[in-house]
Amino acid sequence: MVFFSYQKFLYSLLTNCCFCIYCIYTVDAGSDDVRLFIDNRSNAPIYDQIYSQIKSQIISGELKENESLPSIRNLAKDLRISVITTKRAYDELEKDGFIYTIASKGCFVAKKNTALLREESLKKIEEHMDAVAVLAKHCGLKRDDIIEMLQLIMEE
């Protein structure tokens, strides 16, 4: 069963009382649902919003291995966007190993690639460490001070 609705929210009085339309797409996929929130006023392209949200649901476990995803055409129709846009999002997900496609059957959630997930986590850690290094420099902290702080945090 597919549920689709538009909801209008007042974006802000500061933006001249403009409304932002969020497309909310929910598809019954077994015991779980795929929920996509498309912000038409976002700077992020729509395909990237779809990609990011499905990827996040896969990583969090909301979408299980071998669970079917909405068809490219149905998703495009329900979101009232181009098939090319949804295809691009699915192609990116498949390229990155999050989904797989079976001809004439559709797209499904792939087995979690633990190496890929580890690599993404390492990337996030590096980004946080870069931020720590910048803050430490501004505070005049030395390398040993940062190492000591990290050791204390990891002992907790």
Image (cartoon, helix red, strand yellow):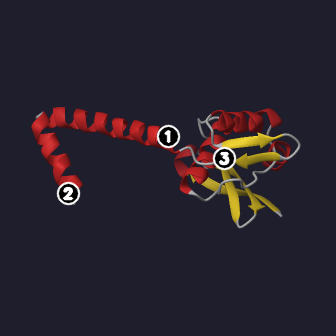
Identify the residue under disc 3.
110
Identify the residue under disc 1.
115
Is tag 1's residue or tag 3's residue first in the polypeptide sequence? 3
Q: Vertically, is 46 above or below 24?
A: above
81 or 90: which is nearer to us?
Answer: 90
Identify the residue under disc 2.
155
* Amino acid type shown at disc 2: Glu
- Left or right relative to 99: residue 55: left
* Amino acid type shown at disc 1: Ala
> Which residue is rendered at x = 52% and y = 39% of the image?
116
150 or 23: which is nearer to us?
Answer: 150
Residue 69 location, x and y as percent? Answer: 75, 51
* Amino acid type shown at disc 3: Ala
**Disc 1, disc 3: CB below 8 Å?**
no
- Tell me where residue 142 sits by quadrant: top left
**Disc 1 to disc 2, how far (Cα)?**
26 Å
- Left or right relative to 95: residue 68: right
